[in-house]
Image: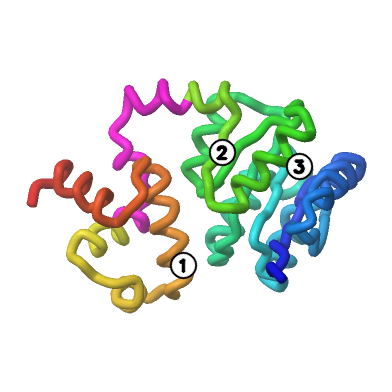
Amino acid sequence: MQEKLKVLIIDDHPLMRRGIKQLVELEENFEVVADVGSGTEGISIAIQESPDLIILDLNMKGLSGLDTLKGLRSEGVDARILILTVSDAKNDIFTLIDSGADGYLLKDTEPDVLLEQIKRIAQGEVILSDSIKNLLLERKHTIDPIDSLTDREMDVLRLIATGLSNKQIAGQLFISEETVKVHIRNLLRKLNVHSRVAATVLFFERNGR
């Protein structure tokens, strides 16, 4: 029997939380381990439960969705994180994707479409609403993707380019292997590549061998 994927829902609207929970539970492979109304509680639960997927609202009272996302990633939470929101503002989208979101979907999506997209995100795909995809494509024409990396992600990329393993990178940077994995996944997403080798090629193209 296939092990169920653990889902955590973080949204400060009780009605929305209940609706998302009911939708997610239509998929028998999902198990909602908690639904909480604040980012602070969400980070705490995520550390305790190690969910596979986190569905996160953007506009919350108290700790915002962005700060919650950053908090989750800084704590080394390796779950897939889906931003589910009413906002399609450019700045929100760019900042959240750059901060480690795996998907960004709008709350006005049809429920059956939304559930299918949630399943695909849980399986490892990066899923974005069509309007958001178009905005990201526009941005790609104007910036070098390496410029979007954080200082720590750049440190990791440099060490990847020297051929070090995750364990060796962790030792060099005094962080855990799990945190290294999170940084690698984020930098691959930002560079729009799917392997360490491809990321290394981009690094060499930018900096020379």
Q: Nearer the viewer, residue 49 or 176?
A: 49
At x 73%, y 53%, the residue is 39
Label 3 packing within 10 angstroms: few (<14), some (14-19), many (20+): some
Q: Secondary structure at mark 3?
A: loop
The relative height of residue 89 versus residue 167 in the rendered view (above or below) is above
Q: Secondary structure at mark 2?
A: strand
Residues shaded magenta: 136-154
Residue 61's disc number: none
Q: Are marks 1 and 3 in contact (CB under 8 Å)?
A: no
- Provide residue 66's location: percent of width, then percent of height: 61, 44
At x 31%, y 61%, the residue is 156
Closest to the camera, between mark 1 and mark 3, is 1
- Provide residue 111's location: percent of width, then percent of height: 79, 33
Amino acid type shown at disc 1: Thr
At x 57%, y 21%, the residue is 131
Q: Is residue 12 left or right of residue 140?
A: right
**Which residue is under mark 1?**
179
**Does label 2 or label 1 sit earlier along the sequence?**
2
**Does label 2 or label 3 sit earlier along the sequence?**
3
Q: Are marks 2 and 3 in contact (CB under 8 Å)?
A: no
The relative height of residue 199 versus residue 173 in the rendered view (above or below) is above
Choose top left, top right, bottom left or bottom right for residue 148.
top left
**Which residue is under mark 3?**
60
**Which residue is under mark 2?**
127
Residues at marks 2 and 1, CA–CA distance in whole angstroms: 23 Å
Amino acid type shown at disc 3: Met
